[in-house]
Image (cartoon, grey):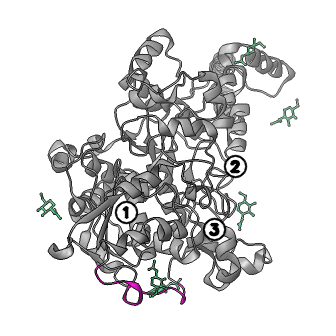
Amino acid sequence: MSTMKKKKNRDELIGLQILQGLLFRHHQRRRRLHHLLPLLSALSGCLLFLLAILLFLSPPTTTTPRHHHLTLNTSLNKGIKDHMYVEKENVFRVTMNGGSLGRDLWSSNLSNFYYGCSNASHYFLTAEMRSVPNRYLIIATSGGLNQQRTGIVDAVVAAYILNATLVVPKLDQKSFWKDSSNFSEIFDIDLFITYLSKDVKIIKELPQNVGKVSTTRAPRKCNEKCYETRILPIYAKKRAVQLTKFDYRLSNRLDLDLQKLRCRVNYHALTFADPIFQMGRKLVQRMRMKSKHYIALHLRFEPDMLAFSGCDYGGGEKEKKELGAIRKRWKTLHTKNPEKERRRGKCPLSPQEVGLMLRALGFGNDVHIYVASGEVYGGEETLAHLKALFPNFHTKETIASKEELAEFSSYSSRMAALDFIVCDESDVFVTNNNGNMAKILAGKRRYFGHKPTIRPNSKKLYRLFLERDNMTWEAFASQVRNVQIGFMGEPNEVKPGKGGFHEHPLACICETSESRATRGGTSQDMDNKNEADQGTEEYSGEGNDDGYSEDELDLSEAEYPEYDNGIPERVSANRKDSGSLLKPDQPELEEIVSD
Ligand SMILES: *[C@@H]1O[C@H](CO)[C@@H](O)[C@H](O)[C@H]1NC(C)=O
Ligand SMILES: *[C@@H]1O[C@H](CO)[C@@H](O)[C@H](O)[C@H]1NC(C)=O
Ligand SMILES: *[C@@H]1O[C@H](CO)[C@@H](O)[C@H](O)[C@H]1NC(C)=O
Ligand SMILES: *[C@@H]1O[C@H](CO)[C@@H](O)[C@H](O)[C@H]1NC(C)=O
Ligand SMILES: *[C@@H]1O[C@H](CO)[C@@H](O)[C@H](O)[C@H]1NC(C)=O
Ligand SMILES: *[C@@H]1O[C@H](CO)[C@@H](O)[C@H](O)[C@H]1NC(C)=O
């Protein structure tokens, strides 16, 4: 509203200046000509006056497509304005610029009070002290790049718990994403080994003489006790244990020092191999050359993913038919009520909705946006709405040549890694989904200084998108800003003990002493000093608040392709981390015994 007013005022001012200029010139001329031709003078005066009135009445030259005339603050004008609000086509008019929020969009003003802290406490025993000779752990990760990343992080912690030597994890080359790259082609294998050398012994290959390897699977969300009771006994008979399909096999809640180990792996030890790192850096530099700041959007809108969501994206019968056909691929999928899914916040925002949200949050059409996405359902037609809102639209294909991308483009994980880097380095990161990449980046960006990370509050936004035709843009924008409070990547958005660890690595975020002092001890201090009172209580809590509901349990059992950072997450929700794991009615127990 205020920007529209400002604009109007500016138009008014320009109009007045032109008018004044004309009147003034007219006045001077009349003086000069006064004694010569009074009649002519009066005539020209009249002409100029007419011209001035004409100018005054003509619409102001403006870039915004508004069609109103005079903008004097009169009751008549007020009437016109009121009328405009009633006219439907004038109601929801998206602004070009973002408007002023009175704060810096590109940073969090609280971020200076927090820092990432993942150093081990002095209670933490080093690899040297713990590792048992001839005890090897082999891990096979599962899924796409980011799901595998969580597996690698958890593998290191599992090896630590078991006092075992870890063999560099095997990447999943058979997943839905079919990437034949091995670990060293994606990650810097030497840094991985040396950075963690104090924590866990890691070797590149299993020695020849270890004998038969026992292959099994760890239960989902297994915690320390669970590893000790379920996996450790195998080492009595075998030197090497291989854990397959290693995804979400470690509890979200662990001892503080184990959480910090997770952060050392995720945020320091696990970096991309040099070719990926260099290309990623090049892409970031190119974005920075275009403008000082950029937004990165991780957009998931693939047909498969939309079909799986069971939501309605407004494409009518055609969409229903197409997505319905894809859904038939999974026999276990039961039909969903699209309206209910949307209300529950389970439907990813469309590209247009993301654009509207960003504009409402204050990002103008001059902002440069990097979009990381796979195939987009509806293709260019779907993207057109977003491009209209943000014409400075880039992807790695638009800012790099085919030749430059050649060594990456036939490997899904390498391409995903490039996007990961550009998204990670962005000033503002935004997603339309709640997948692994979004979660890992959200966590990483918190750790490295709370870089703004916008997660759509889709449960609340859906209503605003539905009703937007009945709203003024200003009302819409202000409500979007309201519902997004708590979803912007600010510190302390999440209560300790809640949420997934990779997304909210609270154990690895410390508050500066300066901040603690000003906040009067109400802080959620995760410093090592407080470890004694915090460790167990915060992190062994029961896991009912991960945000997974019963319905998702069904979803997690469905046979869905190994979608990285996909909506479907096979997390055994609502199960207590300990306790229920020991009940014999779970299939995993049989697997352990039989393997
Ligand atoms: C315009 O008029 C309204 C009342 O009709 C008043 O509140 C407002 O301050 C006026 N604005 C300007 C710029 O004079
Ligand atoms: C941060 O900004 C908010 C408003 O955006 C303000 O209320 C708060 O006082 C600011 N905090 C600091 C530490 O500047
Ligand atoms: C963590 O350890 C490193 C290296 O030992 C040290 O340089 C750094 O200052 C430590 N960080 C904190 C927050 O203690
Ligand atoms: C690992 O080693 C430490 C130190 O020797 C010991 O306290 C712990 O019980 C061991 N754990 C396992 C699972 O072997
Ligand atoms: C990974 O693949 C590269 C290239 O194919 C190969 O040179 C390297 O030996 C492989 N590494 C491992 C550990 O298999
Ligand atoms: C918009 O308002 C009209 C009239 O009040 C109503 O019939 C319609 O359902 C509303 N639409 C939405 C999406 O709320």
| Magenta-tinted stretch | 121-134
Residue kind at label 3, given as amino acid type: Tyr
Tag 3: Cα neighbours inside 10 Å, few (<14), some, or many (≥20)?
A: many
Dots 2, 3 in contact, CB < 8 A: no
At horizontal 61% and vertical 72% (from top left) the residue drawn is: 114
| Image vertical order of residue 55 relative to residue 15, above or below | above
User: Mark 2 Cα within 10 Å, few/some/many (few <14, many 20+)?
Assistant: few
Could you tell me how far apart the alpha carbons at marks 2 and 3 are, in whole angstroms?
A: 26 Å
Chain-order first, disc 1 or disc 2: 1
Q: Quadrant of residue 70?
A: top right
Q: Is residue 133 magenta?
A: yes
**Residue to which mark 1 is pinned:** 152
> Within the magenta stretch, is there residue 368?
no
Instruction: Specify which label sits upstream in the sequence, 3 or 1.
Output: 1
Figure quadrant of residue 88: top right
- Could you say where residue 472 lies in the image, as x and y percent from the top left? 71, 26
Which secondary structure, mark 3? helix
> Which residue carries the number 2 mark?
485
**Which part of the image, by quadrant, shows the C terminus?**
bottom left
Residue 392 drawn above or below residue 204: above
Tag 1–tag 2 contact (CB < 8 Å): no
Q: What residue is at 72 percent from the left and 20 percent from the top?
A: 470
Q: Secondary structure at mark 2?
A: loop
Identity of the amino acid at label 1? Ile
Mark 2 or 3: the one toward you: 3
Relative to the observer, which residue lies in front, 81 or 48? Answer: 81
- Eye-nearest disc, 1 or 2: 1
Mark 3 vs mark 1, CA separation in Å: 21 Å
Amino acid at dot 2 = Ile
Looking at marks 2 and 3 on the same chain, the residue that comes earlier in the sequence is marked by 2
Disc 1 under 8 Å from ligand 5? The reply is: no
Name the residue beneath numbered marker 3.
539
